[in-house]
Image (spheres, rainbow, N blue to C red):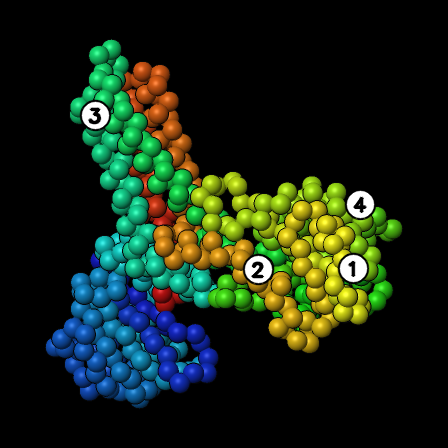
Amino acid sequence: MASPSPTTDTIAALATPRGRAALAVVRLSGPQAVRVADACLSGPALAEAESHTAHVGFFRGAEGEEIDRVVATVFRAPRSATGEDVVELSCHGGDFAPQLILERLYGQGARPAEPGEFTQRGFLNGKMDLAQAEAVADLIDATSRAAHRASMKHLKGRYSDRLAELREELLELCAYIELELDFSDEDVDFADEERLAGLLDEAEALLADLIGSYATGEKLRDGVRVVIGGRPNAGKSTLLNALVGDERAITSPTPGTTRDRLEADAQIEGVRFRFTDTAGLRGAEGQIEAEGVRRAEEAIREADVLLYLYDLAEGLADEERAFLEEHAPGVASAGGDAGEESDGQATLVIGNKADLLNGEAPTPQMNREAAGLPHATLSALEAARDTDRLAPVTDFLRETVAGDLSRAEHSPVVMNRRHRRHLRDARAAVRQVREGLEGGLGGDLLALDLREALDEIGHITGDVTNEDVLDQIFSRFCIGK
Ligand SMILES: Nc1nc2c(ncn2[C@@H]2O[C@H](COP(=O)(O)OP(=O)(O)OP(=O)(O)O)[C@@H](O)[C@H]2O)c(=O)[nH]1
Ligand SMILES: [Mg+2]
């Protein structure tokens, strides 16, 4: 994006999607917003209008012809979303009125807004910090109720509050080190060192908590990746179809029907689950099949959750049990763990085709075969017709995100990779302070590392930033936002 000059340019854009609709909204922001709108409107004189008032009038073309009847709402600087004068024109939707209106506004001196430019101006004018501005984009991009809820919380500033808390903590440390102590001095009071170590612990704990929350944030933002694995003919594709309520995958009694990964989505409890059906795992016979198996294994490695299917009548083969032990160490993580790297793969072993057992309960031997992992019996075929029968699977899936949902409800979760990077760098800097302290480093050097940690936090909130980064962030937005 060209470098913004919010004090001079007036920008205009359509804030609603193009195409057939009852209404559309065209936004104007900048010092000339009111003048430009007034030049095109007959009826109200916005120049005299008070802030936060709405006015009905005709929007006219260059020749004075009527283009549309609109409602113009005026927001005066600084009490607007951008902090500048803003006029919002509600016009009729469709392909023509909004475009004609925009062209006329451009003719009067407004220029087309870049993606995210309205929000960027709001940020530059102190209306919100960068983390909140990014939450606006997340809110628009949300593909599930859970993601929407989490971004809404960020927008309301709860995440920014937590970052402010962290900043305070680091500033206190800085002050302590810079002003009060010289740790290279032999006579440093033991109590002072204790206090400093305590402050470092608190800062590190706050950072660890935020960094650890990214695993949850990622699941809420992109969905939980669930892979359906198992041998050929186990009923994987049948289960996928049942889970998404649609005949997405081809099923057939011929083993080896599915050759490639196939993805389909479903929402459970407001969370998006992204299911991947895979080729059956077996010693491959041909090149295509070998590639299918390779892709299946890759999908299994990448997933948050593995649903491993086998045919109850056949039981689990030795190599399957070995596979399960290797790929799923039994860490049925609920995702609520604060540790960063400990998010193991939740695995449910499913004995399928229970309908063929003629009502016989699965034998203890079958349960033993689950390699110590959670186990359920199912008839994917019947579940496809009657979704209530999917309960053993959907209950398990619900359980795997229960920790994430409760975490997102009670504390801020990091949903942004850029933020995680800065948080990790901040943690590295704090760790360096601790090492420096142990190595008897002088206070001025320790303070340098702390300043670096503070800078990293500043990059998230936008207190420390540069134009390129801002451009990159705001270019993710839609035009008109
Ligand atoms: N009776 C019964 N048949 C089932 C059940 N689940 C799947 N089947 C049948 O088993 C056969 C194989 O099912 P698929 O879903 O294609 O199996 P798959 O695991 O995807 O097989 P590949 O793609 O070849 O690896 C089909 O004929 C299904 O109708 C079940 O619960 N009960
Ligand atoms: Mg299949």
Q: Callout 1: 10 Å neighbours few (<14), some, many (20+)?
A: many
Residue tagged 1: 311
Whichever of callouts 3 and 2 sits on the residue coming sooner in the sequence is 3
When the figure is inspected, residue 122 is found, relative to residue 243, above or below; the finding is above
Q: Position of residue 437 (x, y in %)?
A: 32, 21
**Label 2 vs label 4: CA separation?**
26 Å
Q: Given the image, on which type of amino acid does mark 1 rest?
A: Asp
Q: For the residue carrying disc 2, how many other residues have a C-alpha within 10 Å: few (<14), some (14-19), or many (20+)?
A: many
> Quadrant location of the C terminus?
bottom left
- How far apart marks 4 and 3 lie (CA) works out to 63 Å
- Alpha carbons under labels 3 and 2: distance apart: 51 Å
Give the labeled residue for mark 3. 178
Q: Residue at x 47, y 53 (%)?
A: 403
Q: Residue 397 carries which label?
A: 2
Q: Which of marks 2 and 4 is nearer the N terminus?
A: 4
Give left or right: position of 207 versus 365: left
Q: Which of marks 1 and 3 is in front?
A: 1
